[in-house]
Structure formats: C-alpha cells, structure tokens
Image (spheres, helix red, strand yellow):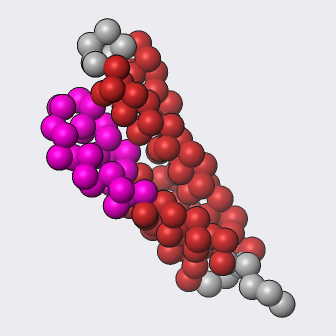
Amino acid sequence: MDHIFFRVGALSGLLAVMAGAFGAHALRDRLAPEFLAAFETAARYQLYHALALLAVPWAATRWPGVLPRWAGWCFLVGTVVFSGSLYALALTGTRWLGAMTPVGGMAFMAGWLCLALSPRSD
C-alpha cells in the first residue's frame, strides 16, 4: 500500500504543476479573477498534499500502524474533494461546488492529525 501513496503523490505533484501552468498561461485571460484565484488555490493545495503523500510511506516504515495509512487516505480524499471542487468551480462557474471544499479541507486536517499522531512515545 505504501508504494501506492508514493506513486499517487508523485503523479498528483505532476498534475498540480501542470494545472498551475495551465492556470497561469491558458486561463489568465479567460477566467474572472475570483475563479482564477480559486483555480490557483486548488493547484497550490494539491501540490502541498502531493508532498504530504510522499511522506506517508516514510512515516509508515518508521512508525508502523494504521495512522500513516489513514493519513494517506485522508490526503488523497482531501485532494480530490478540496482541489477537485475548486477546479470544477473555477472552470464551470457552478458556485454550489464551493460548498464541498470545506469537506476536503477537513480531510486534509484529519490527515495531518493522523500523521502527527503516528510516532509513538516509547
């Protein structure tokens, strides 16, 4: 399972860089500033959590247990829901999609908490 989080993290990083470039070059003159800002936020948080996904396999080998894996799943779900809803909002203008974004943010926070609790006090 750990190699999956590493691969997904690396691919998510690739997609985040591609999305950032797409937003900066192809969307700058096509989106309203508020939608461009949402798109850029989606790409930025996707990149942050791609790096977090890369840390999950390391944490899982250092501190075996369920918490590092839970962190990985939370980061993955958070990326899909948080960044995905912001990408969709920016590209479609469908504002109700923004209501899903906090759910992804909560998944990110849960992932960071799981990662923080992974080391045991020995």
Rendered-image quadrant of the C terminus: bottom right
Relative to 61, residue 81 above or below: above
104 or 4: nearer the viewer = 104
Relative to 104, residue 121 above or below: below
Would residue 72 be found to the left or right of residue 63 on screen?
Answer: left
Residue 71's spot in the image, x, y percent? Answer: 53, 69
Which residues lie in the magenta part? Answer: 81-105
Residue at 37% x, 45% y: name it: 83
72 or 84: nearer the viewer = 84
Residue 36's spot in the image, x, y percent? Answer: 35, 24
Please tell me whether the stretch drawn in magenta is mainly helix, strand or loop: helix
Residue 10 appears in the rendering: no
> Which quadrant holds residue 68?
bottom right
Relative to 121, residue 22 above or below: above
Q: Is residue 99 magenta?
A: yes
Number of disc labels: 0
Q: Is residue 110 magenta?
A: no
Residue 42's spot in the image, x, y percent? Answer: 41, 39
Judged from this view, the residue extending furthest toward the right is 122
Would residue 52 be found to the left or right of residue 34 on screen?
Answer: right
Residue 90's spot in the image, x, y percent? Answer: 27, 31
Would residue 110 be found to the left or right of residue 80 on screen?
Answer: right
Residue at 47% x, 44% y: name it: 46
Residue at 27% x, 54% y: name it: 100
> Which quadrant holds residue 113?
bottom right
Residue 122 appears in the rendering: yes
Relative to 82, residue 103 above or below: below
Judged from this view, the residue extending furthest toward the top is 29
> Which quadrant holds residue 48?
top right
Residue at 46% x, 27% y: name it: 20
